[in-house]
Each structure stands twice: as C-alpha cells, then as structure tokens.
Image (tube, rainbow, N blue to C red):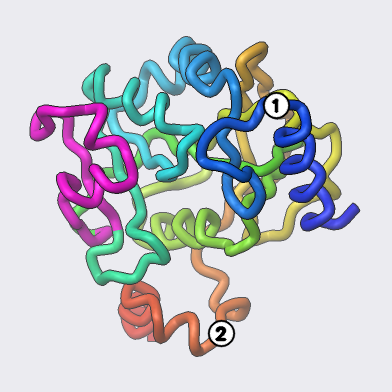
Amino acid sequence: MDKQDIREAVWDELEESGEARFPYPPHGRIPNFNGASDAADRLSTIGAWQDAAVIKSNPDSPQLPVRRAALRTGKTIYMAVPRLKNEKCFLRLDPDEIDDINHATTIGGSAEVGVPVSPDEMEPIDLIVSGSVAGSTAGDRIGKGEGYSDLEFAILRECGLVDDDTTVVSTVHECQVYDDLGGGDAHDVPLDEIVTPERRIRVESDRSKPTGIAWGLLSKERIEEIPILKRLQQNST
C-alpha cells in the first residue's frame, strides 16, 4: 500500500470500530481516538517527557491531553501557526502566563492566549510531540500528507532549536501502529517513541533526523507563501 492507502485504512478502521472520537469523521485529519488520555498518561512516565522543560506539540485533538499535561507540569509549549502563515510562525504557551489551561490548549484557545513568536524568540526544544495517522515500529511516520510537521522540524533545525538528540514522540491508537511503512525519505522526521493507551514502543532505528530545510523539494510558490521560509532563504544566500 502507498501512504494514502494506509491513511484510508487507518481512518476506516477507527470509524468502523467505533474507536474514533470527535471531531468526526476521522478522515482527512490526525484522527482522535478512544484512549487518547490514557496514551498521554503513559507518555508522562517516559524519562524524555519528565526531563523536558520545553516541548513542541501539534495542535490536533488526540494530543489535547498531552498539551494539558504539559502545562499542568510546568512545561512551556510551542505550537505552529496554521500553515506557518505568519512571520511569527509559532505560538508560545507559558504556564506562568495562563489562567485557564483547558481553554488555552484548544485550537481556538491557543490562538487567543498564545504569544506569537518567531524562531529567534524561542527556547531550544527538548521534546517534540507529533500527531500521526500511522507510525511504524521502525520509526516511520505518516501524517495527513501536507508535510507541515516535517517542515516545522526543518525550520527549527535550521534555527538551531532542535538536533539529532531531540526526542520525537507520537501518541496513537493501537490500530495506527504498523511494523513496516516502507521507510521514510531524507526529509521525513523519524519517531523515537510511539505511545498507545496499551504500551510504549521504543523505536530501533539508525535513521538520522533532517539536518535542515530541503530547499530543492520546495516550490517557489510555497516559499513565497511562508514568510519564515523567505527570510531563511534570503539569509542563506
């Protein structure tokens, strides 16, 4: 199966099994699932989580319990602005500046109370939480197919905020875990850990994380529509 076939298979299984949770349908998105809170609880037992003071998280519903747990334990969260459309392309959620954690960790709430920042205003990231449609025990990850998660990592790497030692984790339902997803491309960010409601999977892989932005894979149009890419490209010439 190709990546889209795998996406469709995961979305179908979550829907048909009754394991999908709001928002419905799961198709076309990072799917929410029954047990997302349990997966977040399991993630909180991992050393990389406990040691992290600063995390980057995706904004999707299945990772909402993760974001809430992060703020409740004093961690600062960075979330990307949708489609990286602003020069200040990340939102900072600082637990010392937030009164209502439940509201602040929703998509709408983060847009209201999050502080817009550019990468040069950010702290180094200790841990990345990625949403996934599927992940493999070899560390491969499949997202929605738009490529923003990998691009966000590349931007942060270009700015010196992440490196090969930055742990990347994903919380998913068991049906989203595959033994083999066919391997990743050089610009794909491999997972170090996968956490489900039932188990923790330590990935055994020798794949390196991307070292920066793969400019040759970006169209002129995409660079033009993302301000931080325009600036970084200008600075590199």
Q: Are marks 1 and 2 in contact (CB under 8 Å)?
A: no
Q: Position of residue 77 (x, y in %)?
A: 29, 37
SS of the residue at dot 2?
A: loop
Query: Which comes sooner in the sequence, label 1 or label 2?
Result: 1
Q: Which residue is mark 1?
A: 18
- All told, the count of numbered labels is 2
Residue at (63% x, 50% y) in the render: 143
Depth order, front residue of 167/20: 20
Q: Is residue 171 left or right of residue 14?
A: left
The residue shown at (29%, 55%) is: 90
Callout 2 crowding tier (Cα within 10 Å): few <14, some 14–19, many ≥20: few
Query: Would you say 47 lies left or right of 146 here?
Result: left
Where residue 172 appears, as percent x and y from the top left, is: 62, 29
Q: Quadrant of the C terminus?
A: bottom left
Residue bearing mark 2: 219
- Measured Cα–Cα span from mark 1 to mark 2: 40 Å
Give the amino acid type for the residue marked by disc 1 in the picture: Gly
Side of 195 where 78 appears, left or right: left
